[in-house]
Image: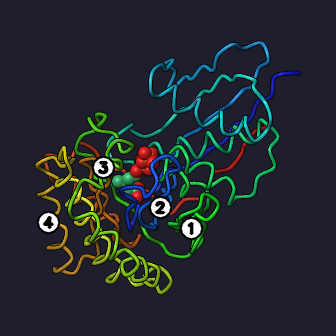
Amino acid sequence: MQTRCATAVSCPNIAFIKYWGNRDDGLRLPANGSISMNLAGLETVTSVTFDPQRREDEFIFDGVPQAGPALARVTAQLDRLRGRAGSSVKARIESRNNFPLGAGIASSASGFAALTAAGAAALGLNLSERELTILARRESGSASRSIPAGFVEWYAANADEDSYAETIAPPDYWALADVIAILDSRPKKTGSAEGNRLARTSPLQAARVADAPRRLEICRRAVRERDFPALAEIVEEDTRRMHAVMRTSTPALNYFAPATEELMRAIPAWRTEGLPVAYTIDAGPNVHCLCPEDSAAEVERRLREIPAVERVLTARPGGGARVIEG
Ligand code: DP6
């Protein structure tokens, strides 16, 4: 057998309604459904080369060979794909991000979406988009949402085959922007995989999960009707609920920097003044400022005036994972 290679590109996504906690950790079946927007311009590019001569998988990330848990997760994901293809051939995986790792821009989402798409293509697996979202989900929940394009919903379910993600509106449906205030680009101390396992230790998680269908419905409708005021209220509420769970887990998790809280006060005040913008925050200190595209320049300007903001990145609604070679 010859070497077989494929390359895929994928973008991270920002959740409007968050995934936090699993009903089944082993299968990564989420406690609640979630909705997100892919972030154009932020990219992971991953090449997978299966080589019969190889004795181990090798994973190079941003030019640096990886070992330990990072390599183990990549191998676990390729094992799922190899299982499907009836193959045991090892691979070299080379991956690059054009955005900072591990600081609340979901790099595991774009990473495992690109890896799943490239690995499946290199093995000659002919999988539907839905099957790819299910496979991506198994190693990183939010990765399932980076496979389809645009605005995406990932469904909670009790069975592996029912927890998939699909586009609810294409990227050009709504001219939104995510203006990301980077407060700290260092990797976080507790990764989301561990954080997700702690969610059930919070007494607030059950209430957050029970109310999720209501938040999902409001968010779906806001996207469908391009209703920014409704989106603003529901994404901020959902963010506060998730961080309340994190902060009341055992051990407690607090991903905020002091300036995160400063922005959580400033942004709703800007909205009251008439600037349409809303915050949402993942498992990191950075603040994603959602706004209509024509307000992005003013949001960027205001963020740059805040000394704790290291950098501002702006992303528009992005496409899905795609194989660019192989
Ligand atoms: C806070 O998908 O990164 O970003 O499944 O362990 O990879 P793993 O966790 P991950 O968790 C994402 C959590 C979040 C919210 C979200 O994106 O929905």
Residue 115 horizontal side relative to residue 36, left or right: right
Q: Secondary structure at mark 4?
A: helix
Residue 110 horizontal side relative to residue 248, left or right: right
Rendered image: mark on residue 290: none
Specify which label sits upstream in the sequence, 2 or 4: 4
Quickly name the residue at label 2. Answer: 316
4 vs 3, front mark? 3
**Residue 189 found in image quarter:** top left
Check whether the beta carbons of the residues at disc 3 and disc 1 lie within 8 A of each other.
no
- The amino acid beneath tag 3 is Ala
Of the pair 311 and 197, the residue shown nearer to us: 197
- The amino acid beneath tag 1 is Pro
Check whether the beta carbons of the residues at disc 4 and disc 3 lie within 8 A of each other.
no
Rendered image: mark on residue 283: 3
Whole-percent x, y for residue 188 in the image:
28, 37
Q: CA distance from mark 3 to mark 1?
A: 24 Å
Does label 3 point to a residue whose CB lies under 8 Å from ligand 1? yes
- The amino acid beneath tag 2 is Arg
Quickly name the residue at label 4. Answer: 266
Quickly name the residue at label 1. Answer: 171
Check whether the beta carbons of the residues at disc 2 and disc 1 lie within 8 A of each other.
yes
Q: CA distance from mark 1 to mark 4?
A: 28 Å
Of the pair 77 and 146, the residue shown nearer to us: 77
Whole-percent x, y for residue 266 in the image:
14, 66
- The amino acid beneath tag 4 is Ala
Q: Is residue 303 above or below residue 253?
A: below
Q: Is residue 241 above or below residue 214?
A: above
Specify which label sits upstream in the sequence, 3 or 1: 1
Q: How many C-alpha atoms fall within 10 Å of the one at disc 2: few (<14), some, or many (≥20)?
A: many
Specify which label sits upstream in the sequence, 3 or 2: 3
